[in-house]
Image (tube, rainbow, N blue to C red):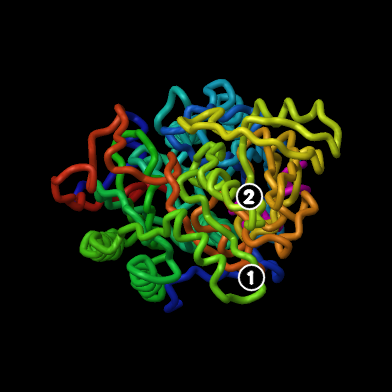
Amino acid sequence: MKPLMNRKAALAGQNSGQLQSDEGRTNHPKGAKFDGRPKLKVLIGQIFHEGNSMNERPTEEADFIIYYGHDILNHCAGNGSALGGILDMVVPAHAEIIPSVSACASPGGPIEQACWEKLRDEILRSAAQASPDVVLLDLHGAMISNETADPEGELLGSLRSILGPNVLIGVGLDLHGHITDTMCQAADVLIACKNNPHDDYYQTGQRVTRICLDAATKKIKPLLSRVHIPMILFGNDETSGGPLFDLNKVARDFEADGVLDISIFNVQAMLDVPDMGQVITAVTNNDPRMGAIACETLARQLLAREPEFKTDHLEIDDLWPILKQPHTNLPFAVSDFGDRVLAGATGDGVQILREAHKRPEVKAAIPVTDIHAARALQNHAVGETVQISLGGCYSQVEPINLTAVVQLHHDGRFVLDGPWLAGLQANHGLTTVLQLDRLVVVVTERPAYSQDFNFFASLELDINKFDFVVCKSGFHFKLSFAKKAIPLTIGTSGIGQYDPNRIGMRRKPVWPETDETPKISEVAHFNLNSN
């Protein structure tokens, strides 16, 4: 076991596998009682973006929906993000809330450095000015910029340097976060959502807030423990069944026995950053022995189940016979897995569109990201026939040439139905709906949240009029279209599909990119002597 890590020294050098709400979305918790002491000052912030190193389209400031100051409370309280859960816990706790910035963008390529620094500095400036007692952040955990492999670790480390060792820092994260030693050395509490598809960000925010408020009122003393496995999962990584369901059940059992939180971080597989792999964290009430037991137990079980993490998707040619088979009156929601925007792909793939276009009997609605086409189409009126080339504006995709009729222009803004990030504003930029024969093509300026039912509804598209709609998503579409469509996952090619033969330059190969059997690290404990 690694030596316990002293933050001051570092600065100087439920039975179910699914996470349930700590308090419930509609019934606000009572919050912490401070017994006449001065109000706690709580800094809150959010920079939420998942990176994909294979995506050459940079994420720009225009891709973010950004709120500053008290606009954050008006727009984010009660929504489906971890920040929504944080706010709904902090507000009734009667703390003094210091809102900094809320910035959310669709997963994609590295954030432009200037954009990242602007958002980062807003949080750091707020922290320096306010001198908070507690910092609560909503981060993804797999963010990258075009100059920084671990921007979230950089942010947390800078916060710790500004605020010193005694201010509590808690972070709600996505379970596909890349959790580094730098992050663990700086934060007191790191907590992942537990479910994939992710329908529990809100509860994650509640949980990190509850632990930090309890620590601020000296009810507990959180200790963060971490273990790492240099391994990437190849598939079968939903939590509603299979190995991750079983592991999460074990984690919840540890929590029932007193561990404050166990998080299993499965990492975004398409990152080209150092020290890639699975991470398990445990937060205990100053109990390194229990933290070590929990981390080691989950790590051993995860490694033992490695052969089960395999992909088994349908091929495009499997789709057409399925459409002809008897089924319910519901349409199909078809996952374009290789071009899934929610894994950071560009959304400009046309594999399914190309094959559907060959079949005049097929009725489908298919989104395509194409910045050049989206802007050019604004020059054509509704009802006008256009000839257009679509696809491959960012990735190595052969475009498709189409003749279609302009049906609708739209500004690309809508509110997510969820449950993934329910209530958040989305913006995929200039958008045009094209009709060609029995197909509808939605051309967007930016990668779109097509996994969400409201994407189609906002464009006046009734999914029941189609054989299928295409969602650039691998998992989350299943929740948004539940009871509305039948989910099918098609294993298309693209940078949304993990390929163990595609290795970047910043990191050494890890399992299954190498024959070397992965080894579990020693458990590291952080912040034992802090707070």
Give the x, y percent position of residue 368: 62, 40
In the displayed image of the protein, which residue is found farthest to the bottom?
15
Mark 1 sits on what residue? Answer: 24
Residue 158 visible somewhere in the drawing: no
Residue in front for this viewpoint, 215 or 328: 328
What is the magenta segment's predominant secondary structure? helix
Q: Looking at the image, which residue is at 71% across and 69% down?
A: 26
Q: Looking at the image, which residue is at 36% across and 65% down?
A: 244
Within-10-Å neighbours for mark 2: few <14, some 14–19, many 20+: many
Magenta segment includes 79: yes
Give the x, y percent position of residue 378: 79, 29
Task: Work out whether 216 lies above or below 395.
Answer: below
> For this view, does 255 lie left or right of residue 421?
left
Give the x, y percent position of residue 375: 72, 27
The boundaries of the magenta stretch are 71-87
Sooner in the amino-acid sequence: mark 1 or mark 2: 1
Residue 382 visible somewhere in the drawing: yes
> For this view, does 401 lie left or right of residue 508?
right
Q: Amino acid under label 1?
A: Gly
Task: Work out whether 195 lies above or below 109.
Answer: below
> For this view, does 248 lie left or right of residue 3?
right
Mark 2 sits on what residue? Answer: 450
> For this view, does 399 lie left or right of residue 434?
left
